[in-house]
Image (spheres, helix red, strand yellow):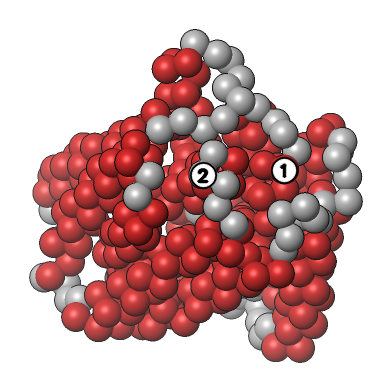
Amino acid sequence: MLMAFATLIPTWYFSSLELGITAFAFLLLIGDVFSFLMKPVIGFLADRHGERHYLMIGGLLFFLCLFLIGQTTSIELIVGLKIISGVASAVVFVLILIYSLRMVQEKPDRKIGAFSGVYNLGWIIGLLLPGLVVDRTNPQLGFYLILGAGIIWFVLMLRFAKRYDSKVSVKASFSYIKKIPGFILLKTMDLAMFSAFLFYFSNYALNVLNLPRSQVSLIVVTEVIFFALSVFLVGRISTQSSRRFWVPLCILFHLLGAGLLVFAAYSNILFVYYLVGILIGVAGGFMDIWVYAHISEQFSVEEKGKVIGTLGWSYDLATICAAAVPSAFLMLSTGMLNPPTVRPEAFTSLLVFPFIMLLAYLIHRRSAKKTT
C-alpha cells in the first residue's frame, strides 16, 4: 500500500505544480537513476546479514522523505528528497521480494502466484484510497497518508521481521549477471508499460480530460486488480512446460493495450481506458510468473539476494523508460523541449515497449538454447 501511495501521490502533486512535461518526467525518474547502483549492493548485504535492519532503515528514510516532498514547492529541495526516497524505496521494494522469495525453489509457480496476488491487494488499496480522500485543490493531504502508512510499516517491521544470520560465506561477485540480462530487459519493458500508462494517463486525465481524481484512481486500480488476478491464476495453472507460452501472451496483451490506448486518446471514449488497464494488467501476470519461477529454480538460496537485487534494476530502468520515452515522443512531435501538456503522441510511444520485448525474448530463447 505504501509503495502505491509513493507512486501515485507524488505524480499527482507534480502535476499540480504546473510544470512542463520535461520537468515532470525529470522529477519522476531522478530517484531511480540513483537507486540503480544500490540494487546489487543491497542484495549482497541481505545475503550476508538478512533483510530486517535494511527493511527498517530503508522504510524510515522512504516515507519521511516522501512526506517532506509534499511540504515544499522548491524544485531543488524536491529533487534532493526524491533522490533519497527513490533510493530508499528501491531498496525496500527489492528487499520485500528477497525476503518473500528467497526460500522458494521447487514448483515455484503457485507460490509466486499466491504471493504476488496477495501482495497486490495492497497496491489496489493504495491506488484507490488517494482518489477518495485527496482533493484536487489540496494534494498535500495525500502525503499524510504516506506518513501514517509509513509509521505502521515501521512498527510492523520492528515487531515481525525475523532475525537471522547467514550461515554461508557470501562473496561479492557479478559473474551471475550474465545469466539474467534477458530477465532484466523483459521485466523492464513489462513494467515500463504499467508505469508509462500510470504517469502519462494520470497527467492527461487530470490536465486535459479534467477527470476527477477518483475516476483516475479507478482506472489505474482496474489495471492492478487484473494484474493481481492474472498472476494468481497463471500461477495456479503454470508448469515448466507451459511457461513457454507466457512471454508471447504478455507481448500480445501489451500490444493490444498500447493500440487501444492510442485509439482512446484520439477518440476520448472513457471505457476504453478501462480496457487498456485490463490488458496491461493481465500481461504483467504472465511476465511475473515466467521471470520469478525461472529464477527460483535456477539459483540457490544463498545467492537469491544478489540475483533478485540485480533484477531490481528493471524497476529503475522501467521508470526511466516510462518517463523518458513518451516525453521524447512529445518533444519530437511538438518541436518543443518542454511541452506544456500531454498529447496523444505520448501514448503512441507505448508501442515501442512490446516490440522491444519481442526482440529480447527471441534473443533470450536463442541464448538459452546455446547454453543448453
Q: Residues within 10 Å of mark 2 (few under 14, many from 20)?
A: some
At x 33%, y 63%, the residue is 278
Give the residue type that dot 1 points to: Ser
**What SS does tag 2 mark?**
loop
Q: Which residue is mark 2?
A: 209
Give the residue type that dot 2 points to: Leu
CA distance separating discs 2 and 1: 15 Å
* Residue 56 pos. (x, y %): 76, 71
Vertical placement of residue 255 versus 226, above or below: above
Q: Earlier in the sequence, mark 2 or mark 1?
A: 1
- Label 2 vs label 1, nearer the camera: 2
At x 74%, y 74%, the residue is 149
At x 27%, y 47%, the residue is 260
Q: Which residue is mark 1?
A: 16
At x 27%, y 79%, the residue is 233
Q: Quick one: 56 or 113, which is closer to the camera?
A: 113
- Tell me how many marks there are: 2
Q: Is residue 292 left or right of residue 67?
A: left
Q: Is residue 347 left or right of residue 90?
A: left
